[in-house]
Image (tube, rainbow, N blue to C red):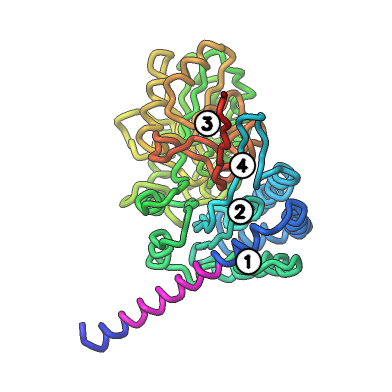
C-alpha cells in the first residue's frame, strides 16, 4: 500500500467518524427537546404517523417488495397494518414518562434511555422500523437507523416522510435519523459510540453478536428455527392448517415461523394427508435430493440467497416438483444423521418433517432448537394439559405457543402476547430477556420507596 493510499484511508476514516459524531450529537439534542413534550403532543405525533401509513399500507408493501424481492405484498401489507393498528392502539394514551403509578409508599417513574441505535432487517424494513420509531417517540427517545444497503432509496423516502411529520409537529427531524450509506464500519462505530445508550439489532448472527459485544444494553433478534411438536392428542386438521398458514406467511421469511415438524408415528399419515389438503407437497426421496440440489447452497448449507422468500410454487418448479394441486409449501421428510443441515432455519416456504414417539419427540424438539434458534419460539399442538406442561417445562424458548400458527402466535395476533417485531431470547440466546420488546424496554424505571416507619 502506498503512502497516498494510506492517507486516503485515514481521511476517509476521519470523515466517517465525524459523520457518526454529528448523527449522535444531533440525536442527543433532539431527544432533550422531545422530553419536554406533553403526553398529548406525543400521542398526536403517533396518531399522525399511524394515519399516514395506514392510508398507504399497500403502496408501502409493494415498494418494499420491489426493493427486497423477498416475501409477498399481501403479508407485507398485513405486517404494516399490525403496526399502525395494534401497536399504535397499545401505545396511544399509555403513560410512559414521569410518574406511572404505584402506592403511597412505592411509586414508579419512567425516564427515557436516551439515544437508540437500531439495525433493520431486509425481511421487513418498513414495518420493523415504523415499530421502532413509534416505540422510541412514545418513550421520548431519539433513534438512528441502519438499513440494508439495497433499501437505501426506500429508507430515505420512508425516513423523509417520518421527518416531515415531525416537522409539522414542531419537532426536530434528528429525532429519527438514518445512517447512509450503510457500512459495517459505520454500524460498528455507532454500536461503540459513547453517545449511544441502547442498541436494537434485528438481523443475522454476526450482527446480533456484535450488538451483544458492544458493551451497551442491547436487544438482538437472530434466527428462530422453530420446532413444532404434533402430539398424538393433537387436532390434526387444525394443526395442519395452522402450520401451513404460519410457514407460508410472507413466503417463510419470518424468523419465528415454523421450521421443523415432529410428529408421532401413529399420527404421521393423518398429518401428511391434512398437510396435503392444505396445499403442502410432501416430497418423495428423489424429490428431496432435487430440492437439496436446487434450493440449498452447498457451501453454507442454508437456503440459497436467490431462493429466500420465494413462493413454494416457484421453488417447486425450479426443482421439477409438481402436484395435481397448487403447491403452497414444501415439506421434506427428514431423519437425524442424514442431511442434518435441513434442520437449520429455512427462510422460505420449506419445512422438515421428523418422526418420533412420546419419549423422544420433546427431546428432539429440544435438540433442534438448541442447535439453532435457542430462546426464540417453540410450538406444541396437543389437547393434553400434561403434555403441554412437560413441553413447556423443558423447552428453551421465550415463547411456547399452543395450538396456533408459529408466525401469527409469536407476533401476538392469535395469542395474548403483545404485538412486537422484536422477540427477546433470554439467556438461552445470549440475551437478557425473553420478553417481546415493547415500550417498557425503552425506558428506565425508577422506584421511589418511602420508609415503612
Give the extent of the magenta segment.
9-26
Looking at the picture, tell me which residue is in the foreground, 202 or 114: 114
Disc 1 marks which residue?
159
Q: Is residue 333 left or right of residue 162?
A: left
The residue positioned 57% from the left and 46% from the top of the image is 443
The residue positioned 60% from the left and 44% from the top of the image is 110
Q: Secondary structure at mark 4?
A: strand
Q: Residues within 10 Å of mark 4 (few under 14, many from 20)?
A: some
Kindly report which numbered mark, 3 or 4, lies closer to the viewer in this rendering.
Answer: 4
Q: Residues within 10 Å of mark 3 (few under 14, many from 20)?
A: many
Disc 4 marks which residue?
109
Q: Residues within 10 Å of mark 2 (few under 14, many from 20)?
A: many
Whether the residues at callouts 1 and 2 have beta carbons within 8 Å, the answer is no
Disc 2 marks which residue?
136
Task: Quadrant for residue 188, please give it.
Answer: bottom left
Q: Is residue 218 left or right of residue 76?
A: left
* Mark-to-mark CA distance, 3 and 4: 29 Å
Task: Quadrant for residue 194, please give it.
Answer: bottom left
* Mark-to-mark CA distance, 1 and 2: 14 Å
Q: Secondary structure at mark 1?
A: helix
The residue positioned 71% from the left and 49% from the top of the image is 81
Whether the residues at callouts 2 and 3 have beta carbons within 8 Å, the answer is no
Amino acid at each position: 500500500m502506498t503512502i497516498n493510499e494510506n492517507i486516503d484511508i485515514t481521511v476517509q476514516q476521519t470523515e466517517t467518524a465525524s459523520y457518526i459524531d454529528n448523527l449522535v450529537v444531533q440525536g442527543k439534542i433532539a431527544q432533550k427537546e422531545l422530553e419536554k413534550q406533553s403526553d398529548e403532543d406525543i400521542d398526536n405525533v403517533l396518531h399522525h404517523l399511524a394515519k399516514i401509513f395506514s392510508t398507504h399500507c399497500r403502496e408501502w408493501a409493494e415498494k418494499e417488495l420491489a426493493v427486497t424481492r423477498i416475501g409477498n405484498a399481501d403479508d407485507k401489507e398485513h405486517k404494516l397494518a399490525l403496526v399502525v393498528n395494534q401497536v399504535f392502539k397499545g401505545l396511544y394514551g399509555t403513560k410512559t414518562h414521569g410518574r406511572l403509578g404505584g402506592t403511597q409508599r412505592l411509586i414508579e417513574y419512567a425516564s427515557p434511555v436516551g439515544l437508540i441505535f437500531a439495525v433493520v432487517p431486509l425481511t421487513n424494513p418498513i414495518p420493523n422500523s415504523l415499530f421502532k420509531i413509534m416505540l422510541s417517540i412514545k418513550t421520548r427517545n431519539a433513534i438512528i437507523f441502519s438499513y440494508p444497503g439495497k433499501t437505501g432509496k426506500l429508507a430515505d423516502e420512508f425516513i423523509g416522510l417520518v421527518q416531515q411529520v415531525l416537522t409539522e409537529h414542531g419537532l426536530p427531524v434528528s429525532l429519527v435519523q438514518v445512517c447512509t450509506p450503510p457500512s459495517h464500519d459505520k454500524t460498528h462505530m455507532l454500536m461503540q459510540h459513547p453517545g449511544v445508550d441502547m442498541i436494537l439489532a434485528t438481523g443475522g448472527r454476526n450482527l446480533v453478536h456484535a450488538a451483544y459485544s458492544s458493551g451497551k444494553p442491547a436487544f438482538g433478534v437472530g434466527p428462530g428455527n422453530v420446532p413444532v411438536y404434533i402430539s398424538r392428542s393433537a387436532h390434526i386438521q387444525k394443526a395442519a392448517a395452522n402450520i401451513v398458514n404460519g410457514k407460508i406467511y410472507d413466503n417463510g421469511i419470518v424468523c419465528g415461523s415454523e421450521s421443523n415438524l415432529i410428529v408421532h408415528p401413529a399420527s404421521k399419515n393423518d398429518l401428511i394427508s391434512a398437510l396435503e389438503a392444505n396445499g403442502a407437497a410432501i416430497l418423495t426421496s428423489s424429490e428431496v435430493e432435487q430440492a437439496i440440489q436446487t434450493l440449498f447452497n452447498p457451501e453454507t448449507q442454508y437456503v440459497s440467497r436467490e431462493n429466500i422468500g420465494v413462493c413454494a410454487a416457484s421453488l417447486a418448479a425450479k426443482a421439477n416438483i409438481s402436484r395435481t394441486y397448487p403447491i403452497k409449501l414444501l415439506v421434506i421428510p427428514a431423519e437425524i444423521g442424514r442431511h442434518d443441515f435441513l434442520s437449520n432455519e429455512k427462510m422460505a416456504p420449506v419445512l422438515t418433517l421428523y418422526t418420533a414417539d412420546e419419549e423422544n419427540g420433546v427431546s428432539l424438539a429440544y435438540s433442534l432448537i438448541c442447535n439453532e434458534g435457542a430462546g426464540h419460539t417453540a410450538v406444541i399442538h396437543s389437547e393434553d394439559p400434561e403434555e403441554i406442561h412437560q413441553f413447556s417445562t423443558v423447552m428453551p424458548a421465550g415463547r411456547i405457543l399452543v395450538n396456533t400458527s408459529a408466525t401469527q402466535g409469536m407476533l401476538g395476533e392469535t395469542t395474548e402476547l403483545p404485538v412486537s417485531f422484536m422477540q427477546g431470547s433470554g439467556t438461552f440466546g445470549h440475551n437478557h430477556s425473553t420478553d417481546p420488546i415493547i415500550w417498557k424496554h425503552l425506558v428506565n424505571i425508577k422506584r421511589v420507596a418511602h420508609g415503612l416507619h
